[in-house]
Image: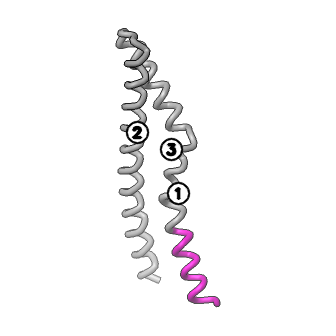
Amino acid sequence: MIAFFRLAAILLGVLSVIYLVASVHGARLRRARLLREWAELGETDPTARAAFVAEGMREWRHGFRHRLLLAIYVVPILLIALIVYLSNFT
């Protein structure tokens, strides 16, 4: 049983690092895309630019792509559970 908890702790630690890296990378890409869109609009007001980027980032955090990152946790855990079930109960 101790081995299971050790595996779970290591797995959650590794998956958390992967999630953080993927989340930061996705946020950087989204911010760069928003800044490109703002540059194409040709406006120069820095306050409006900051509001535009903040709104775009808020939409990204509540959007499907950001939530899809949670699959980083779900998929490996389900695969391990499936392997354990198949190797022990079939």
Q: Please say whether residue 24 is one of the residues in the magenta stretch.
A: no
The quarter holding residue 2 reads bottom left
Is disc 2 placed on a helix, strand or loop? helix
- Classified by dominant secondary structure, the portion drawn in magenta counts as helix
Q: Give the x, y percent position of residue 45.
A: 37, 9
Question: In this figure, which residue is indicated by the disc labeled 2?
Answer: 27
Q: Count residues near mark 3 (Cα–Cα under 10 Å), then give few for <14, some for 14-19, many for 20+.
A: some
Residue 76 position (above or below residue 26): below
Q: Give the x, y percent position of residue 10.
A: 38, 69
Which residue occupies the extreme front position in the image?
40
Quadrant in which the C terminus appears: bottom right
Q: Amino acid at mark 2?
A: Ala
Nearer the observer, 60 or 2: 60
The colour scheme used to paint the residues is one colour
Cα–Cα gap, marks 1 and 2: 17 Å
Is disc 3 placed on a helix, strand or loop? helix
Q: Which mark is residue 71?
A: 1
The quarter holding residue 54 reads top left
Of callouts 1 and 2, which one flags the residue occurring earlier in the amino acid sequence? 2
Q: Count residues near mark 2 (Cα–Cα under 10 Å), then give few for <14, some for 14-19, many for 20+.
A: some
Question: In this figure, which residue is indicated by the disc labeled 3?
Answer: 66
Q: Are marks 2 and 3 in contact (CB under 8 Å)?
A: no
Q: Amino acid at mark 1?
A: Ala
Q: Give the x, y percent position of residue 34.
A: 42, 27
Magenta-drawn segment: 77-90
Residue 77 position (above or below residue 69): below
Give the residue drawn at x 48%, y 58%: 72
Give the residue drawn at x 39%, y 10%: 43
Residue 60 position (above or below residue 75): above
Q: Amino acid at mark 3?
A: His
